[in-house]
Amino acid sequence: MTIDAHHHVWDLSVRPQPWLDQPGLAPLRRNFLLSDLEPEAAAHGVTATVVVQTVTEPEETPELLALAEASDLVTGVVGWVDLEAPGTAEAIAALRELPGGGRLAGIRHPVLTESDPDWLARPPVLRGLAAVAEAGLCYDVVVMPGQLRGAVVAAAATPQLTFVLDHLGNPEIDGGVDGSWARAIADFAALPNTVAKLSGVLGEPAPPSADPGAADGAQIAHIRPHYEIALAGFGPQRLMFGSDWPVSTMSVGYGAVYAAARSLTADLSPSEKDAIFTGTARSTYRLADATARSL
């Protein structure tokens, strides 16, 4: 089996997605529903998924929980609560009382939209993160490379909480590896309470110079240096596969993302591959009971 540890869904008739107003995102300005993902997942042996929040509105997470409750595919939800508000613990407790509340696996805030590079290290945010830990949830970190240092500070200050880095910290793939990103990844990975998702970068298209008829290895050559840095830092036991569907459809299809992940990890042992494609997500998000229902 394979767990897709990172995807989104949205219905623009139910909930606007203001972030889609950014330039260049026109292909995403339509509905992407679970019914669109299900055949793609089935075609690639994906039997369980984690759906992740997209907007900072309290109404979205209950909708995602209800979706998971009605689904045999979605086994975990990474939702949103206001981490700076004094009632973070109460907000999480209220979500758990809702239909599907048992599938709440983590909390995320889109830090990459914050102007403060150290937003995660703010005292009110750290208090909110402590409440996330107390609730037994994970925290998904979505940042730009310049904000990774704040994530390192927050993870070091909250050792009781597992921090899950989305998209390897969104490095720039074109032009090789940025040294500051690599150093920040190494520092983040050195903390025992950190995990990373092999997601986002898998949808980065090969540079124009790549031969479209070349072997698969050539088509992922631009991704491999970043993957190898992440693998060296986290190891397979702290890496997990995520499609980042439907954002990844901006460049490639679901199958191409899945194929890129399989090609990158082709040299690993069977147990190491199992960790990246199943075990890490299952243990990190505590999906054991939910994934068993999908077998």
Image (cartoon, rainbow, N blue to C red):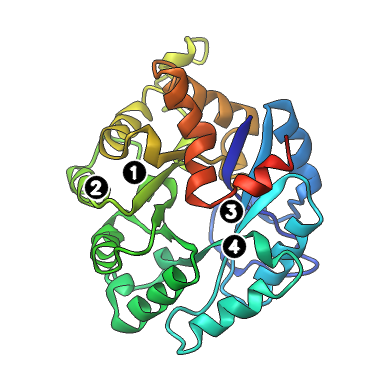
Q: Quick one: 70 or 252, which is closer to the camera?
A: 70
Badge 1 crowding class, 10 Å Cα cut-off, few under 14, some 14 to 19, many 20 or more, is some
Mark 4 or mark 2, which is nearer to you? 4
Secondary element at image label 4 = loop
Which amino acid is tagged 4? Gln
| Residue on which the image places disc 1 | 172
Q: How much space separates mark 1 and mark 4, taking CA atoms? A: 23 Å
| Residue on which the image places disc 3 | 25
Question: Which labelled disc corresponds to residue 53?
Answer: 4
Secondary element at image label 3 = loop
Is the residue 253 above or below the residue 71 in the image? above
Q: Is residue 246 visible?
A: no
User: Hey, which quadrant is residue 225 in on the image?
Assistant: top left
Q: Position of residue 116 (x, y in %)?
A: 30, 74
Is the residue 108 above or below the residue 215 in the image? below
Q: Count numbered badges in the picture.
A: 4
Q: How much space separates mark 2 and mark 3, taking CA atoms? A: 25 Å
Check contact, mark 4 vs mark 2: CB within 8 A.
no
Question: Disc 1 or 4, which lies upstream in sequence?
Answer: 4
Residue at 81% in and 56% down: 70
Which amino acid is tagged 2? Trp
User: Hey, which quadrant is residue 233 in on the image?
Assistant: top left
| 100 relative position to 198: left or right | right
Check contact, mark 2 vs mark 1: CB within 8 A.
yes
Residue at 63% in and 54% down: 76
Which amino acid is tagged 3? Leu
Which amino acid is tagged 1? Glu
